[in-house]
């Protein structure tokens, strides 16, 4: 079947040109034309990202308004959606009008910061509970995981170092510096090879995942 | 809750039988009980701080000594990439860094050396860059908590400056290289002046002019600074030795980034650190409390011994460390008890 021009061939051509210029500029620094084109693409990326924020704002507004207007939705979802919309638009409008004014500062300090802190703080309780519930020595591979976690947990509790000295802590650091780093480097290399592969696929016009309908 | 489902009482999870043996019951402690103990432990130390003494880890000493070795006119880039919710994890590191840099800067400025020839004695040049949308709020909180300890000769615009948030840090770093800082930052956060109008920044043109880069973004700064920083990475094999990579670490790698991460991320950061892509690393709550303790023992308020030492808890680091101490002690103790229970359960052939 012939490949449609607008939905496939044109975007693939754009993807190909973008990838070639960006990667080419990285490895062949010195060419003014290539450098200017790469710079322009970089600026477009910043603009597109900013534009994506606006798209997100509109999409969320449409979705939440539909939920609010739909009588079949649960009362809980409708009330939460009203709160969500009010919060999102009040903060956006105040931020646009005067992002350094007392109103925006008050919201940032007493609403945003407090809620973010509370959300982040709550995770701690679940993590401590998960350590107790799930870290059971069921098999030898889980035993390695559990014992290493336990060693780090104890080592990162300064109270322990205060009473029993720093030998334990040094052992934990040895794990970080040697076995953990070896595994981490292997993972980093795999990820880097994956990125190179995506770049090559992009240059050859084989990377079609971004166009929808799966990759390949 | 019916009696059958809640038979063993509220200390245990629903479904635990009254006649279940101890090794089963110990594994079925109710979540509410477990979390209540954590809440009590954390609350106690926040109300009555214990400030348990800690030793200062090598990571903190490495960066602290590096800052101590800086000279008048040296530029420090301090960026904040994570959202404000993480302030409990990183707040103390940033307050300590800012306090330390300003105190050192004040001491250097008092020497009266004018390095860049603009007629103003130079200390350190601290550039604050919010890389998250709420980074400004975090910096303002940190400045507010520490400003009273800064030396009196530290002046905004001459010795430090804060720039507003710019969208998308990854591309912004490339933009610094392509177009220079003055094209990216046109109005500073407090006075609305341009990059080239302020004595603190007008001599800073590109990443090559920055001596210390401290931030939180995993790989972008490392990549950009490795390519365009003051001391680009040299991959010559003869520079490597078995245990260190001389020529790629402090102070030779002075322009490479110092990362501020949480404890959990240490494993992720280590490959970059050992490869010399990171010149330094801060490890969450623990290093925040330790840095506060280091500052307390090494510096006086406004560099004036008559005013006493820089107090602890400028960024609530030691208080948080106390809370972490008790919560983690409870957690690893319960991990042991839970595993002992599990071991007995397997020996008895019971599965719950």
Image (cartoon, grey):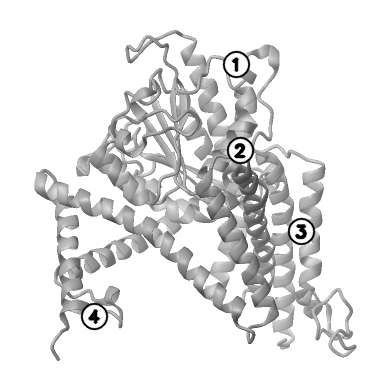
**Chain letter of disc 1 in the image:** B
Identify the element where label 1 is drawn: helix
Mark nearest the camera among 2 and 3 is 2
Judge by depth and name the residue closer to the eye, B9 or B143: B143
Across the whole image, how many numbered discs are drawn on residues?
A: 4
Dot 2 surroundings within 10 Å: few (below 14), some, or many (20 or more)? Answer: some
Query: What residue would you read off at disc 1?
Result: B303
Mark nearest the camera among 3 and 1 is 1
Q: Is residue A145 visible?
A: yes
- Residue A197 quadrant: bottom left
Q: CA distance from mark 4 to mark 3?
A: 50 Å
Query: What residue would you read off at disc 4?
Result: A216
Q: Residues at marks 1 and 4, common chain?
A: no
Q: Position of residue A162 (x, y in %)?
A: 69, 42
Quadrant location of the C terminus of chain A in the rendered image? bottom left
Q: Position of residue B247 (x, y in %)?
A: 29, 35
Residue visible at 69% across and 77% down in the picture: A76
Q: Earlier in the sequence, mark 1 or mark 2?
A: 2
Quadrant location of the N terminus of chain A in the rendered image? bottom left
Mark nearest the camera among 2 and 4 is 2
Query: What residue would you read off at disc 3?
Result: B38
User: Are circles 2 and 4 on residues that touch, CB within 8 Å?
Assistant: no
């Amino acid at each position: 079947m012939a490949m449609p021009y607008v939905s496939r061939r044109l975007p693939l051509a754009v993807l190909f040109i973008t990838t070639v210029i960006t990667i080419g500029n990285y490895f062949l620094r010195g060419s003014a034309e290539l450098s200017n084109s790469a710079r322009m693409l970089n600026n477009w990326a910043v603009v597109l990202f900013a534009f994506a924020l606006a798209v997100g704002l509109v999409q969320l507004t449409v979705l939440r308004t539909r939920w609010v207007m739909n009588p079949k939705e649960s009362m809980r979802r409708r009330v939460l959606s009203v709160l969500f919309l009010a919060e999102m638009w009040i903060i956006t409008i105040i931020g646009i009008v005067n992002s350094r004014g007392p109103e925006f500062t008050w919201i940032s300090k007493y609403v945003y910061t407090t809620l973010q802190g509370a959300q982040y703080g709550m995770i701690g309780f679940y993590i401590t509970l998960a350590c107790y519930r799930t870290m059971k020595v069921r098999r030898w591979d889980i035993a390695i995981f559990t014992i290493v976690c336990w060693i780090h947990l104890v080592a990162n509790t300064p109270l322990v170092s205060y009473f029993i000295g720093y030998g334990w802590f040094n052992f934990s650091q040895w794990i970080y510096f040697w076995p953990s780093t070896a595994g981490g480097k292997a993972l980093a290399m795999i990820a880097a090879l994956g990125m190179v592969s995506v770049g090559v696929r992009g240059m050859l016009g084989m990377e079609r995942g971004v166009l929808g309908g799966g990759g390949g | 809750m019916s009696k059958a489902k809640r038979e063993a009482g509220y200390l245990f999870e629903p479904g635990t039988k009254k006649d279940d043996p101890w090794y089963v019951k110990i594994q079925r402690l109710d979540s509410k009980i477990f979390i209540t103990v954590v809440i009590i432990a954390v609350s106690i130390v926040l109300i009555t701080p214990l400030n348990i003494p800690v030793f200062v880890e090598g990571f903190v000493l490495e960066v602290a000594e590096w800052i101590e070795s800086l000279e008048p006119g040296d530029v420090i880039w301090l960026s904040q990439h994570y959202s404000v919710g993480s302030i409990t994890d990183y707040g103390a590191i940033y307050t300590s860094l800012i306090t330390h840099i300003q105190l050192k800067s004040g001491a250097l400025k008092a020497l009266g050396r004018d390095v860049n020839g603009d007629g103003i004695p130079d200390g350190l040049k601290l550039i604050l860059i919010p890389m998250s949308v709420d980074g400004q709020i975090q910096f303002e909180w940190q400045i507010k908590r520490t400003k009273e300890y800064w030396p009196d000769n530290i002046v905004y615009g001459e010795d430090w400056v804060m720039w507003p948030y710019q969208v998308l840090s990854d591309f912004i770093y490339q933009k610094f290289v392509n177009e220079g800082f003055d094209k990216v930052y046109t109005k500073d956060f407090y006075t609305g002046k341009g990059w080239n109008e302020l004595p603190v920044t007008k001599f800073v043109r590109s990443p090559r002019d920055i001596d210390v880069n401290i931030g939180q973004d995993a790989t972008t700064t490392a990549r950009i600074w490795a390519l365009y920083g003051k001391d680009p990475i040299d991959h010559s094999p003869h520079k490597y030795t078995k245990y260190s990579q001389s020529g790629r670490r402090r102070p030779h790698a002075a322009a490479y980034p110092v990362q501020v991460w949480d404890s959990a991320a240490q494993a992720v950061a280590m490959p970059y650190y050992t490869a010399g892509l990171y010149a330094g690393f801060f490890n969450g709550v623990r290093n925040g409390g330790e840095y506060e303790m280091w500052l307390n023992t090494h510096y006086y308020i406004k560099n004036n011994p008559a005013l006493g030492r820089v107090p602890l808890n400028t960024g609530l680091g030691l208080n948080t460390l106390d809370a972490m101490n008790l919560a983690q002690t409870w957690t690893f103790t319960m991990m042991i008890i839970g595993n002992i229970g599990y071991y007995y359960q397997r020996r008895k052939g019971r599965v719950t």
